[in-house]
Image: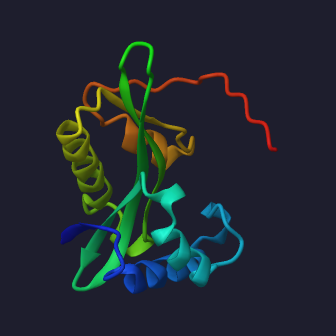
Amino acid sequence: MVFEFLNSENIAGYIAYLKKAMEEEPEAMTAEILDENGIRDRLGDPFYQHTKSILAIDNDLVVGRIEYHFYGCLQDGYRMAYVDWVYVLKDYRHRGTAQQLFRELERDCVENHIFQYYLIRATNENADRFYKHFDDARLSCEPLLRKYI
């Protein structure tokens, strides 16, 4: 298994992975349709240049990904990452793929002097079991405000 940042050379594999994920578990996806042209356009859009995706690739097939972005607080200089998405295809779960995606994220965080990362996690039994195995992490139920504009 190799891990690469999403780029123009591996985007076709990424789109194939998304198609498979949407076929397998449409209820777990945040999008209802796959906008291939939109994805290709966003890859070059300056707004998305701070969003990173690391792909898990097994025999030239994208089987998982973690997407995140860095940001910081000007007041105290604290540097953080927010994990937008992590997903591994069903046939590749329980093989250490998701754990390795998080290790790759953490390596990028260290290289960029990021102090912590966080995510809004799924709360199903499998997700809880997965996240409880993280070292030096805590699970919590935080109050969240979400407003659509």
Against 129, is 45 above or below? below
Residue 32 visible in this rendered orientation of the protein = yes
Is residue 130 shown left or right of residue 3? right
**Coordinates of residue 43 in the picture (x, y in percent):** 46, 70
**Coordinates of residue 5 in the picture (x, y in percent):** 29, 65
Question: Which is more toward the observer, 117 or 136?
Answer: 117
Against 3, is 145 above or below? above
Furthest residue toward right: 149
Q: Which quarter of the rendered picture does the N terminus lie within?
A: bottom left
Q: Residue at x 43, y 46 (%)?
A: 69
**Coordinates of residue 9 in the picture (x, y in percent):** 31, 83
Is residue 104 shown left or right of residue 6? left
Q: Quadrant for residue 77, please give it.
A: top left
Q: Quadrant for residue 71, please give it.
A: top left
Is residue 85 shown left or right of residue 136? right
Question: Which is more toward the observer, 70 or 28?
Answer: 70
Residue 21 visible in this rendered orientation of the protein = no
Q: Residue at x 78, y 37 (%)?
A: 147
Q: Which quarter of the rendered picture does the C terminus lie within?
A: top right
